Image (tube, rainbow, N blue to C red):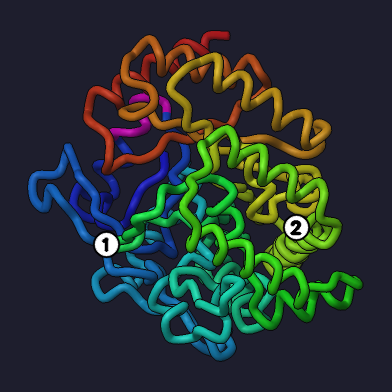
Amino acid sequence: MFSYSWDLAENGVAKTVNELSKIGINSITLASSYHAGKFLRPKSATNKVYFPEDGTVYFKSDAAKYGAIKPIPNSIYGDGQVLRELTETKGLSVSAWLVLLHNTPLGTKHQDSAVQNAFGDPYIYALCPSAPEARAYAIGLAKDVTESYEVDGISIESIGFPPYEHGFHHEMSHVRPNKWLSQSLGLCFCKYCVAGAEKLNIDAKALKARIAINIHNYLEGDIDYENDMADALWLADVASDPDLHKFLEFRSGVVTSLAKEIRQGVRKDIEVAIIPSVARPSGGAWYEGTDFKAMAKTTGVIEACFYEPTIGRIKGDLADIKNRTDNIGKIKGILRPAFPDLTSEEEVVGAVRALWEGGVKDIGFYNYGHIRSQSLNWIGKALASVSKK
């Protein structure tokens, strides 16, 4: 079960663990570094709508383990007591869920290390995986939590380049969105990306200028690409522009190398799982720099979000991930047993069985504080249906 510190603290760690164990849950993945949000909490007796502090960590961090970019302790749960209590619970597996580079306070403070578009505009919600200080922060975060707490693993999210769409506060655009525009705006041309690409003989400066001109002309024009046109035009750009194609491959190398440094930097007995993306389908994570096969070779574990509303789509996504990993490493799965995905007992049972029969035996559920009590019952029925096999 994926969970947040505030939900476990309110309900009580021991009480929650007992509640979850009764339905067959034997592991908790606790958000230990997380961003902001506006969360509706069905089961909570208080604070039905919760706003967590942005970009903070939920464990007692050691500033000496970091460079210029240091973690921000959560003012309520930054002592790490919830994580400590979980790791001291016998018979329970615990993983630390780390949102690495998606961090608005740190991106705002360290804009030199933030993603920058073709116009040089910093995206303050995202540190760039090419930036040395951002990489040092990400590696430090993984080492810090695994050295200070007896966790069994870490689940890493936001290790790559973010898409343009973010859902930022009062995000506004009076130009109809489409994939061509969004993908073009999402490309990072910070000085570290440009320099890294040029080392591979990619003319990144010319590509940056070309992307900027194309975006400017489109925004100043009087046409809107329909969705199918935009999809085709973006694919045409990737296929016909050698520098763009190589630049996207360069991004994958950057992300894979960061994952490798994290894997090498933490305890050898720690499982390092990569949550590749929340793109639908998962194969779309290539844009963010996730090469499934390379990641599987690097960390050994892909923890995929099967956030789909039908069993058929979940099966299709799993088949594609298997093809992309070439059956290297282990696939873990995350399901949402509630709106907007699986909204009935039948659907939850079917989704769990589909993953189980597809070889995915490690299944997580998102998220304890977000779902109704009925969803917990559905999970229990689903786990019972596969435990008998």
Quarter of the figure with residue 139:
bottom right
Q: Nearer the viewer, residue 97 or 127?
A: 127
SS for dot 1 = loop
Q: Which mark is residue 48?
A: none
* Distance of label 2 from label 1 (alpha carbons): 30 Å
Badge 1 crowding class, 10 Å Cα cut-off, few under 14, some 14 to 19, many 20 or more, is few
- Amino acid bearing label 1: His
Q: Nearer the viewer, residue 120 or 167?
A: 120
At horizontal 33% and vertical 66% (from top left) the residue drawn is 81
In the displayed structure image, the side of residue 169 where residue 300 appears, left or right: right
Q: Is residue 186 above or below residue 61?
A: above
Asked if labels 1 and 2 touch by Cβ distance under 8 angstroms, the answer is no
Magenta stretch encompasses residue 175:
no
SS for dot 2 = helix
- Give the magenta range: 19-24
Residue 88 appearing in the image: no
- Amino acid bearing label 2: Leu
User: Which residue is the site of mark 2?
Assistant: 248
Quarter of the figure with residue 203:
bottom right
Badge 2 crowding class, 10 Å Cα cut-off, few under 14, some 14 to 19, many 20 or more, is some
Question: In x, y percent, where is residue 39?
Answer: 24, 50
Q: Is residue 35 above or below residue 352?
A: below
User: Which residue is the site of mark 1?
Assistant: 170
Disc tally is: 2
Residue 285 appearing in the image: yes
Question: Mark 2 or mark 1: which comes first in sequence?
Answer: 1
At horizontal 60% and vertical 36% (from top left) the residue drawn is 229
Question: In x, y percent, where is residue 77?
Answer: 29, 68
In the displayed structure image, the side of residue 52 where residue 135 appears, left or right: right
Quarter of the figure with residue 87:
bottom left
